[in-house]
Amino acid sequence: MAASLALAGALALGACSADDGSDSDDSTPSASASASASGSASASASASDDLAGSWLATTDGKAVVLVVNGTQAAVFTTGGTTCSGTAGEESGMEMIHLTCTDGSDDRATGMVDSVGAETLKVTWEGGLGQETYTKAEGGQLPSGLPTAGLG
């Protein structure tokens, strides 16, 4: 159940900025501009199209959801950790910079090692190391995701 709640929250975040198909010109500054300005080492350019979307992992028995939308990024875990920040290109590398509500710095800075159609690998500075994520398509959990014992 907790994994479902984390996924639902992540998908809701991703849906908040979905294109409604209108061609109107909105000149109001976006939230991503202020979000990237607030970080001490924020991403300078938008994340690649390959990185955009919702990604799922299981780390230390907890479900981890990483959502990237433009320059915005967020992580939700079944343990209750919520982190938000930026994702984008820095010096030719894709980087993620997050601030977590519980003060944790496990996922404060991450470098994207590889991103493909179904798999994302991020190495987080500090003790967490590398996490491998699976792409969530259409709000569905990917097959083969270990969910037993999450909570």
Image (cartoon, helix red, strand yellow):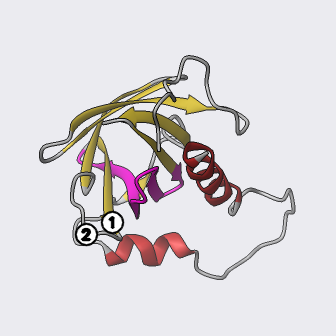
Classify mark 2: helix, strand or loop. Answer: loop
Give the magenta part as a residue range.
68-91
Between 63 and 28, which is closer to the camera in this rendering?
63
Residue 22 disc label? none
Instruction: Say which residue appears at 21% left-offset and 59% top-offset.
Output: 105
Please say whether residue 75 is one of the residues in the magenta stretch: yes
Q: Which residue is mark 2?
A: 103
Magenta segment, principal secondary structure?
strand
Q: Where is residue 135, by image quadrant?
A: top right
Q: Is residue 10 left or right of residue 83?
A: right
Q: Position of residue 123 (x, y in %)?
A: 24, 37
Query: Which amino acid, by three-letter code, is at mark 1?
Result: Cys
Please give left or right for residue 41 compared with residue 85 in the image.
left
- Residue 126 part of the magenta-drawn span: no
Where disc 1 sits, the SS reads: strand
| Quadrant that contains the N terminus | top right
Q: Residues within 10 Å of mark 1 (few under 14, many from 20)?
A: some
Q: Nearer the viewer, residue 25 or 112?
A: 112
In percent of width and height, residue 53 lies at 57, 42
Amino acid of disc 2: Gly
Residue 122 appears at what percent x and percent y? 31, 36
Q: Residue at x 51, y 29 (%)?
A: 147
Q: CA distance from mark 1 to mark 2?
A: 5 Å
Residue 100 shows which numbered tag? 1
Give the crowd class for mark 2: few <14, some 14-19, many >=20 residues within 10 Å: few
Q: Residue furthest top?
A: 144
Q: Residue 41's spot in the image, x, y percent?
A: 23, 65
Q: Are marks 1 and 2 in contact (CB under 8 Å)?
A: yes
